[in-house]
Image (cartoon, rainbow, N blue to C red):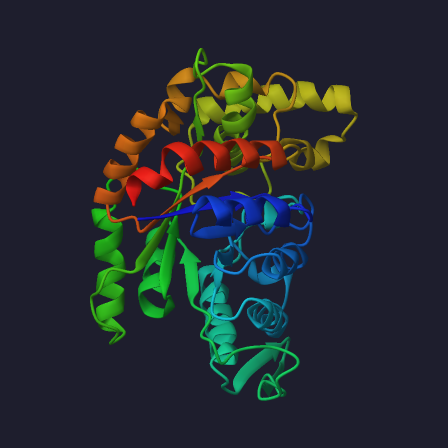
Amino acid sequence: MDIGIAFPSYIDAWREVQAAEEAGFTHAWFFDSQLIYSDVYATMALAAQHTSRIRLGTLVAIPTNRIAPVTASAIATINKLAPGRVTLAMGTGYTGRNTMGLNSVPVSMFKEYTQQVGGLLRGEDVLFREGDQERWIRLVHADRGGFINIKDPIPIYLAANGPRTLRVVGELADGWVTTGAGRNLDNDYASIREASEKAGRGTAKPYTVGLIPGCMLRDGESLTSERVMAQVAPNIVMRSHAQWEASFGPGANLGVQANADAAEEYDRYIQEYARTSGTPSDRLYLDVHRGHMVFLKPGEERFAPPEYIARTLTGTSQQILERLEAIEATGVDNVVIPVVDAQGAKDLIEGFGKEVIPKRR
């Protein structure tokens, strides 16, 4: 099983990506959320220039952030800098949409966008729509060496957890991204396999990327130690953000199974937080996603209790190795651990580079 690291796209992440490559990580992934992080493709470009082996990918690019030809050109430009080691993973949108008070994109739009980007990256003419207008487009200078690279294939992975998006994975994708690393994935694989077979693409299991937070404990640390909470809890609390969105937010179609009690508890928290921050009631979603997968707002730690931390890839090196074996048994091909900042990345890279990756070779 491949081991990857995911970054909240900060522009200097190339330093940690370089260290991850040296430590034996196979993949570096970068979040795409325009109101929270640095630009994902600028961040990837610097990482591409400073590495030579590690695979680089978006996790995940959002259709409405850029029209299809812009996304195709951007990822093909990265592929020019890092030939043959680039992946485009796309999704319907979480913070890339919700921080603007918008729902995730409809599945029909997601499917069409995937078809357009995929066609362009294969060097095809693609029908592009803008309002009532339809025009054929292509990457006109793909055959000229100085601009982009589509000679080396760029696989497209799709993030999906609901039945309709899982079908799109089966119909179109080269790989699947899930936040469900560690749970039983058999039903999801069955949905993907059925859609793939109907589309004439066979029944092989897709390359599967599983996202799960984690932290290697140092001597004397517990699940609630300050360093552990700082590195893991922001990735736990984002579930509370999703619960709030599902019940109270303008971006309510995330496919989250709403938990009324959890949503109401977080709503009480964010209402009080907004009174302190001065955020008007019609834009609470901006406060909800402040710190998203990066840091905890004051008082948010109560939404990341120890029993939630225990479900992550957090523990001693031996505990992490055992958990990795269990995750691999579910069919995950690439386990990805998100970090919150440069220091968190350095800690993860050092711990995994010394105690985990060498023991899995």
194 shown above or below 288: below
Relative placement, left or right, of 63 versus 110 is right
Q: Residue furthest right?
A: 278
The count of marks equals: 0
Q: Position of residue 29 (x, y in %)?
A: 51, 51
Residue under the image location 25 percent in, 38 percent down:
325
Q: Is residue 253 visible?
A: no
* Depicted 170 relative to depicted 278: above or below: below
Q: Nearer the viewer, residue 192 or 342?
A: 342
* Direction from residue 54 to residue 290 in the image, left or right: right
Within the image, what quadrant is residue 159 found in?
A: bottom left
Residue placed at 43% from the left, 40% from the top? 256
Q: Residue at x 43, y 21 (%)?
A: 217
Q: 169 or 30, which lies in front?
A: 30
Q: Is residue 280 left or right of residue 7?
A: right
Residue placed at 26% from the left, 44% from the top? 328
Residue that sits furthest to the top in the current view? 220
* Residue 262 visible (yes or no): yes
Where residue 20 sits in the image (x, y, percent)?
Answer: 51, 45
Give the x, y percent position of residue 285: 65, 36
Pick whichever, 259 or 296, lies toward us: 296
Quarter of the picture containing the C terminus is top left
Measured from the top left, where is residue 78 in percent x and y?
59, 67
